Image (cartoon, grey):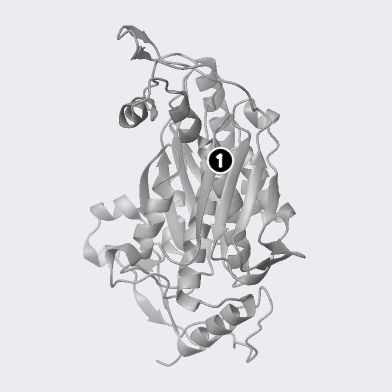
Amino acid sequence: MGQFRFLTAGESHGKGLTAIVEGMIAGLPLDVGYINTELKRRQQGYGRSSRMQLEEDKAEIISGIYHGLTTGSPISLFISNRDWRETEPVTCPRPGHADLAGVTKYGLEDIRPIMERASARETAARVAVGAIAKRFLEQFGIAIHSHTMAIGHVTLNQVQGLASCHCQPTSIDWQRVESSPVRCSDTKLEKEILATIDKAKADGDTLGGIFEVIATGVPIGLGSHVHWDRRLNGRIAQAIMSINAVKGVEVGMGFALAALKGSQAHDIIEPRPPVIAVSQSPERSKGEAKQSLPWRHATNRAGGIEGGISNGEPIVVRAVVKPIATLAKLLPSVDLHSGQVAQAHYERSDVCVVPAAGVIAEAMLAIVLADAMLEKFGGDNLKETNANYHNYQLSCHRF
């Protein structure tokens, strides 16, 4: 990867989670309240476990911020766990978790160390890191949102679901999404989803689904076709697939393209006269409209990426989240010590995490895009990066 990278440490029921962020430039306005807002969004969502009422995730900035601005030094964050306690050994692995593979790989007799680190609790640290990336991207007019497309058998209409791949995703009411307990833009479907989650909970079962994450304002030219590991779609897919319980990722129309002919699948390029002129000052104000390129894509089936490079259209990514593997209705397993048939271990668990997974995906997409932006435009200070970005925008009109 490029310049922006991070590490996390900590366990689900340990003292807390630590994140160390390297590569963020100096001069970025950042306060802990911005990070905590993102952490709160991750904790929301109908179908979450009682731990989300117990924990109140708040980050503590340990280093890298001085008087509200990044310094260019590594940024370290700490998120404490309220539910910090001694835990008992576990010997019955849970199907669908890292339990069995983990203890076998590391030669352990107790599953607990695997459970504690493999837990989705770690994603709180990722969301905190993603908040830093989002704050950076905002300086260049890039915004990232997510919404729920399906939970269980309740799915958005196929035409609605793929609308954002055919045109600019302006039809989604993001305020409505943020106010929805399941991050769904459709009020009718929201009611069906809530009822479906209630039914699964009563049955001791869990639900998966599909979320979509969209980045708007992304400039053309992030990523590269020249090496496999520099392709932007590959970097995004890896980041999204790293999220707990995600089992499939598609960019743009993704798997739906398999049913189309080539004449139907690709985005026609058409001319467009410039609409907005760019200010001559390299220190453009936040939110100032970008210069329109003299052409555009008539549709966005590619999801904003062609040949591993962003093409100037919104980046659209969709992912499948499997049902949570920890069930109140216990699944059969084997006790690793006795070798006898036993029921899988159970701890407090969510019923559905699709809405929260969308928020985590926002963070992971932001991290990849921030890295790609810094790779493309460089700089050690926000002013320098902004000037490089501005000059590049002007150069795009040389054709």
At a point 64% along the width and 71% down the height, the residue shown is 26
| Front position in the image: 41 or 76 | 76
At a point 33% along the width and 27% down the height, the residue shown is 107
At a point 42% along the width and 52% down the height, the residue shown is 239
Q: Quick check: can you spot residue 291?
A: no
Residue 299 in percent (x, y) is at 40, 67
Horizontal side of residue 346 vs 98, given as left or right:
right
Q: Residue lying furthest left in this view?
A: 261
Residue 138 in percent (x, y) is at 62, 67
What's the residue type where badge 1 is placed?
Ala
At a point 55% along the width and 78% down the height, the residue shown is 379
| Front position in the image: 372 or 261 | 372
Q: Quick check: can you spot residue 201?
A: yes
Residue that label 1 marks: 356
User: Where 269 sits versus 52, above or below?
Assistant: below
For the residue labelled by badge 1, is the local secondary structure a helix, a strand or a loop? helix
Residue 44 in percent (x, y) is at 64, 38
**Quarter the N terminus occupies:** bottom left
| Front position in the image: 351 or 171 | 351
Residue 325 in percent (x, y) is at 43, 26
User: Where 360 sits versus 365, above or below?
Assistant: above
Neighbor class of circle 1 (other Cα within 10 Å; few <14, some 14-19, many 20+) is many
